Image (cartoon, rainbow, N blue to C red):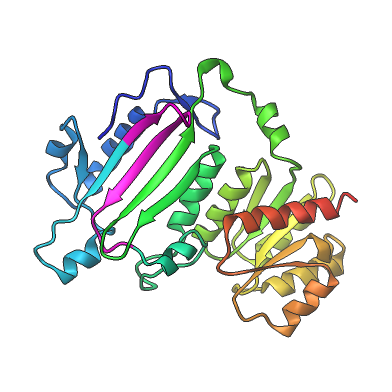
Amino acid sequence: MLENVPSGIFVKDARSLRLVRVNRAIEESLDATRDEMIGRRVEDLLSQSEVTEINAEHAVAAKAFSDPRHVGWVRIATSWDAVASEVRIEVQDNGLGMSPETVARAFEAFFTTKRSDEGTGLGLCITQSIVTDHGGRLEIDTSTGAGTTMIIGLPHRERASVCGASDRAASDGQRGRVLVVDDEQIVRDLLADVLRGRGHEVVMAADGLAAIRHVQRCADAAPFDVVLTDIRMPKMTGIELLEACCDNGTATVDQFVIMTGALISQEVLALERRGARIMVKPFHVREVNDLVAQTLLSRTR
């Protein structure tokens, strides 16, 4: 149910610094994705005044499979909390819900309970990053077998309270130029969005060879402060990239943040002893921001 949030209440778009009316943004998003919905009752349901109810494809698919009589749905509700001074968005489904163990790891990048061909484990991680960039909070209310409600709380902004880009940058701490290297585009895009949300300038490369070209091209005019790279990639590994940059003098070990799996090799531990920072998958968005911030701080001392 999209309640009549007061007309003077807005939330701020973190990228464009525009003021946004939440109900309008949700309705426009639903209009844009309407043809992709699995249900055919969407037109009728969107016209109802009290509740927006959409047949869900992913959130309730497992429960529908186990019980053919089960009719899956997703409800989107908005409300205004005057006490907390926030606009609240709730997305509720009647699927299988989550166990406490799953909830504890739900926001970790690459964590998923789906098969490898069904999901990447990045959806909630990206969502949390977007909500955080807007100064909000994201919570999960769920229990096994009872469905799930995702609760987003966004601080309201009145027209006079919108700050400029320089004010936002000042609150974000030190910023730098970051090269993100990963052969998976969805991972590159996630990391780039997270870092740009903190005011960093980001360049992306799909493999080590492309990364070396970026580093060499920018070495004199605008060198990178941080190189965030995956360890396993075609053409050139992250370790080979690091050693090549160190050998040709275009970067140093302490500029590198290495992403690796849970099994950390002796070679990776040796790089850590030399000054590189290690980020183990699955990781949390805040780990990305923290490690980049630590790298920037260490290079200004």
Q: Is residue 100 left or right of residue 207?
A: left
Q: Residue at x 80, y 65 (%)?
A: 245
Q: Residue at x 29, y 33 (%)?
A: 27
- Where in the figure is residue 64, as x and y percent of width and height? 17, 64
- Where in the figure is residue 38, as x and y percent of width and height? 19, 53
Q: Is residue 88 magenta?
A: yes
Farthest residue toward the right? 301
| Range drawn in magenta | 78-97
- Where in the figure is residue 89, as x and y percent of width and height? 37, 39
The main secondary structure of the magenta stretch is: strand
Q: Nearer the viewer, residue 140 or 158?
A: 140
One can see residue 72 in this view: yes
Compared with 227, 137 (above or below) is above
Compared with 122, 65 (above or below) is below
Q: Nearer the viewer, residue 98 or 48?
A: 98
- Where in the figure is residue 170, as x and y percent of width and height? 73, 33
Q: Is residue 175 left or right of residue 188?
A: right
Farthest residue toward the bottom? 266
Q: Residue at x 66, y 31 (%)?
A: 168
